Image (cartoon, rainbow, N blue to C red):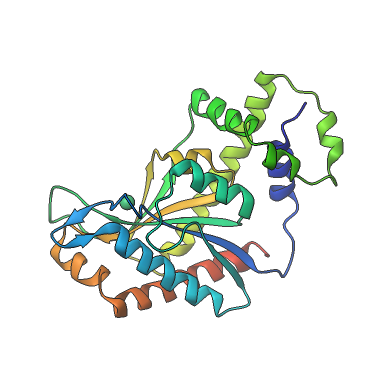
Amino acid sequence: MLKPILFTLIVTLSFPSLGRSLKVLIDPGHGGDAPGAIQGPYQEAHYTWLWSQALFKELNKSKDFKPFLTRKKGQSLSLEKRVEVALKTKPDVFLSLHLNSFKDPDVSGMEFYIQKSLSSNDMANFLAQFESHEEIQNSTSTQFDFLKDLKLDLTHELILTGLVKKKLQRKSKLLAETLKKHFPDSRIKYGDFFLLKQLPHVSLFIEVGYMSNPKDLKNITRPQFIKKQVKKILLGLRLYKQSHHF
Ligand SMILES: [Zn+2]
């Protein structure tokens, strides 16, 4: 039987609805017991929360967006739980916010990270996570039940999963490129992230700047700067929404 997640993916990718709000799930990196990177008195998790909350408030002012947060202030949340929140929320876009750190203090700037291509092992893990989520299997649409009749073996499920994940990766890249228009000095990079590997959504990591770079650190911890930057993220998301007819 075709796994419910696969036809959820097919439905999501094939039938975008017109004129509705873009559902954005904002993930404040780390939190609670996990402070993330530390630079003197500065803890990454404190600022991922400030950035996420500022972005949430900004998006919430506009009818174009329906923002959500994966966690509460100061809450510890495992990566697996973040995936679960995303599966329940079913966002159009998932953004995980972080502050970067590197041994060379000269390295600076904002970066957008996209998941690089998945290995067949990654794809098997992606599929396997849904076997253990009864709740998710029961929550799928019945409108496309005919797809369940496609009795696929594991090989074909993996091929289909691979195609869907490729399409998501292309869309995630498009989102990064659209956001970058408002941040000309930023960079787009590929990486390997558990969260991005496991999510069946358009998803990015946004590293807002380097805590290890003194100039960046001064900016990215300043409320005025955060406010200015989240307004630009909103503009990028709006452009993405318009070009995708949400
Ligand atoms: Zn981080």
Compared with 220, 145 (above or below) is above
Q: From the image, which quarter does the C terminus lie in?
A: bottom right
Is 29 in front, or is 208?
29
Q: Quadrant of residue 215?
A: bottom left
| Camera sees residue 183 | no
* Horizontal and vertical percent position of residue 113: 39, 49
Depth order, front residue of 167/228: 228
Of the 4 image quadrants, the one containing the N terminus is top right
**Residue 154 versus residue 164 in the image, above or below:** above
One can see residue 215 in this view = yes
- Taking the spot 13% from the left edge, 59% from the top edge, the residue there is 40
Quarter of image, res 158? top right
Q: Residue at x 26, y 75 (%)?
A: 222
Q: Is residue 66 left or right of residue 58?
A: right
- Is 239 displayed left or right of 9 in the figure? left
Q: Residue at x 20, y 65 (%)?
A: 217
